[in-house]
Image: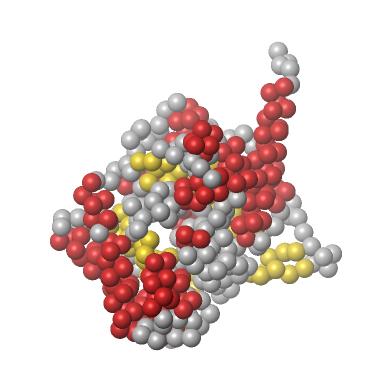
Amino acid sequence: MHSHRLLHETALSLDFDQLLNILVNVENVLIIQDLDGVCMGLVKDPLQRSIHRGYVEAAAQFSPHFYVLTNGEHIGTRGVNRILEKAFGHDAYLRRQGCYLPGLAAGGVQWQDRFGQVSHPGVSDQELAFLQSIPDRIRDRLQQFCDNYLQHLAPAVINDCIDASVLDNMASPTANLNSFYEALREQPAVYAKLQAEMQALMDACLQDATAQGLDASFFVHYAPNLGRDASGMEIMRPATEIDSGTTDFQFMLRGAVKEAGVPVILNHYYYQRTGTYPLGAEFNARQAPQDYDELLDLIATSFDSFAMPIIIGVGDTVNSQVVEQDKSQTVRRGGSDRNFLQLIQDIGQIFNKGNIIVYVDSSQGEVKNRRQVNLEKDPDGSLYVVQGPCDPKDTSDPLQLNIVFPGGHQQYTEVFQYASETRQQRQRTLRRQPSQY
């Protein structure tokens, strides 16, 4: 059932035609998109990720109206660039055609242009050196845990789990427990112990950083999480009977939060269109205000309204959980895409631009920590969404997911590729039309 309302006014819509209309026909449009689960399937071992060539070429065609914003990384053995190079067979074509995915990785501190040039604006050599020590610490702690609690597993299984779990990212080293969750399905108490062990390790790393004079340099990102506590620290999501809870324990640079990446991307986008950087050429995510209201105010006061694009934010990690205790309810809202999508929505309201929030249902992947979108059929046979990814008892969520892709990354990338090609055809037609003057 198609609504007559504008797309940014709807919730959980399946009206892909309206989205296509904007992607194809609006000249000043900006896509800011997450990666894992959105244009690639979620897998237990990040080394097994794959990406479709057609999608990568479609993203290049959207330039300069397309940027990525991810907690993963562009470079390294587990970076997205390696996945692209595998899909194309070599990197020369990617560089020549400008097919690397431009934008921010490592939560906002790793910048890449579409020709694969990478930098870490605002990051010191001392910070990068400390980060380099984290993967070995994760490996040692996992090995120690296995020696203590997992003697029943074959050594080959343990080695595979550890290898898949240690993500030696340059700017965001990570413990990814997906493989361990799979191996410990029948032992939830042991898996819960492992979650606690990784949390303790991350706390110890933060304390060691403070001892080295890097007390304001790092924080821990839990994915998925239960939002933040009163002090601004993210809350780990314990495993339940039906999902793995927090699987990714990412040791990250302060300022490397996705919402801080939004003004960085806008700053670059404005430069491409106007020739000037509203926030200065050197502005980076680590300079962005950490307070959400201050961040929104910075954007509201720095960017010209006339040049502001319609922003389409695309993510797959948004959740909430309502905890009932002593006749009262506590709502925990989290997900690593939540804050950047909320910021895009709020920017749209401030500038009256009708920004659109797109949710891709990645619950069908190998990683089971996302609530599936529920669909039903109208009497005429058309589908509609009856329940989104958040807790049904959470009825006052400020984030409105305007459009949903229940078919996951395959469905989203198919629409994305169609939009890219149709937009190119439209622009070629417009260029061929004779001037009226």
In the rendering, at what x and y percent does residue 395 appear? 56, 69
Q: Nearer the viewer, residue 234 or 179?
A: 179
Give the vertical position of 54 relative to 409 (above or below): above
Q: Residue at x 46, y 76 (%)?
A: 181
Judge from the rendering whether residue 306 lies leftward or rightward of residue 436; answer left or right: left
Quadrant where the image shows the C terminus: top right
Can you name the residue that lies furthest to the right here?
380
Query: Does the image show residue 309?
Result: no
Render colour scheme: secondary structure
Q: Is residue 406 left or right of residue 95?
A: right
Residue 92 lies, with reference to residue 432, above or below; the image says: below
Q: In which quarter of the image is residue 71?
A: bottom left
In the image, what residue occupies the spot 49% across and 82% down? 185
Screen quadrant of the N terminus: bottom right
Among all residues in the image, which is located at the extreme top? 437
| Count of picture labels | 0
In this orientation, which residue lies closer to the viewer: 280 or 169? 169
Quadrant of the rendered image containing residue 403: bottom right
Q: Which residue does the image show at 39% across and 67% down from the upper left? A: 163
Q: Where is residue 296 in the image (x, y as percent from the top left)?
A: 42, 47
Residue 249: percent from left, percent from top: 37, 66
**Residue depicted at 30% across the width and 67% down the height:** 138
Residue 391 at least partly seen? yes
Q: Is residue 332 left or right of residue 26?
A: left
